[in-house]
Image (tube, rainbow, N blue to C red):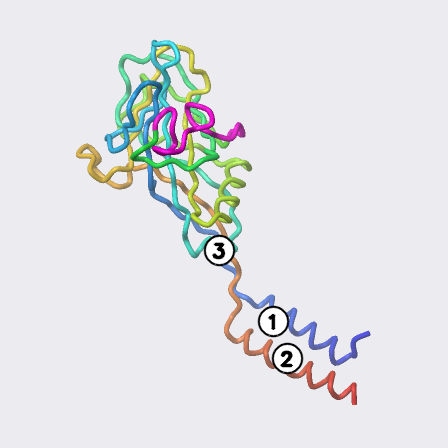
Amino acid sequence: MPSLAASRILLSAAALSLGATVASAATLSFSVTGDANIRPNTANTNGSQLVLVGDTTTANDYLRGLFSFTLDNPALVGATIHSVSLRLFVETADGTSADRNEVIQVFQLSRAFNETQVTWTNATTTTPWTTPGGDFSTTLLSSVTANPRTVTANQSLTFDSSSAFVTSVINTLQQPDKTLSLLLKLETENNQRSIFRFYAGTTTNPNLAAAALRPQLLIDYTAAPIPEPSAFAALAGLGALGFASLRRRRR
């Protein structure tokens, strides 16, 4: 059993730990670090002004968008992640698309891609996808329902948070490169033209009026509590007192 003095020291230390500065909730916005289109029998379209997601009237001709975000920010070390959302901005409506609502889905890629090399069949020049069209988890992270024919220029579409989206970010933060790679596709790819035209992240896009229109990943979080400097000093003093108390008892 610890002595009364030792017990008091432990209680004091616990009280001091509660005196740590508790950070309030905040939001970080991450800009896209890589994006591309992939499409069967079509060359890589990285560096274009747009990322297209949808379907065409040709059998097995789909358009899928890839995005990557590097989440290397000191504020997220030990932080509690509350929510995660993806925000994309429409360049223009597609006037030849079917006039109907479509569900755009977001999945996490299980393999990183190189935006200058990725194609329908390869993640990089030397690394093929296991499955053509992108290797991605079947767990749905988020989705948005919209009409590709009636969306408006610069309209934002936000893929809201889910527990799966939060988990994907938490797991990504444990990885050395902290890069979250995402794939967007239509829920139903059925040979009917439905194409969404999103602004890409390239800074050379002459039609991109502001950086605010580029793809964004938003993370709501609370930073890990930071002990006050005085608490460190007090804890050191309490440690010394505890050590002295133990020495006296042993004597």
Residue 16 is tagged as 1
Number of residue marks? 3
In the depicted view, which residue is nearer to us: 27 or 47?
47
Q: Residue 22 at what x, y percent from top left?
A: 52, 61
Residue 77 is tagged as 3
Give the quadrant of the C terminus.
bottom right
Residue depicted at 35% across the width and 19% down the height: 40
Q: Which residues are magenta?
A: 119-140
Q: Is residue 71 above or below residue 119?
A: below
Q: Kindly report the distance in space between the C-alpha atoms of the residues bearing marks 3 and 1.
A: 22 Å
Disc 1 marks a residue whose amino acid type is Leu
Q: Residue furthest right?
A: 1
Q: Secondary structure at mark 1?
A: helix
Mark 2 or 1: the one toward you: 2
Mark 3 or 1: the one toward you: 3
**Pointers 2 and 1 in contact (CB under 8 A)?**
yes
List the residue tagged with mark 2: 238
Q: Residue 250 at what x, y percent from top left?
A: 78, 86
Q: Secondary structure at mark 3?
A: loop
Circle 1 crowding by C-alpha within 10 Å: few under 14, some 14–19, many from 20: some
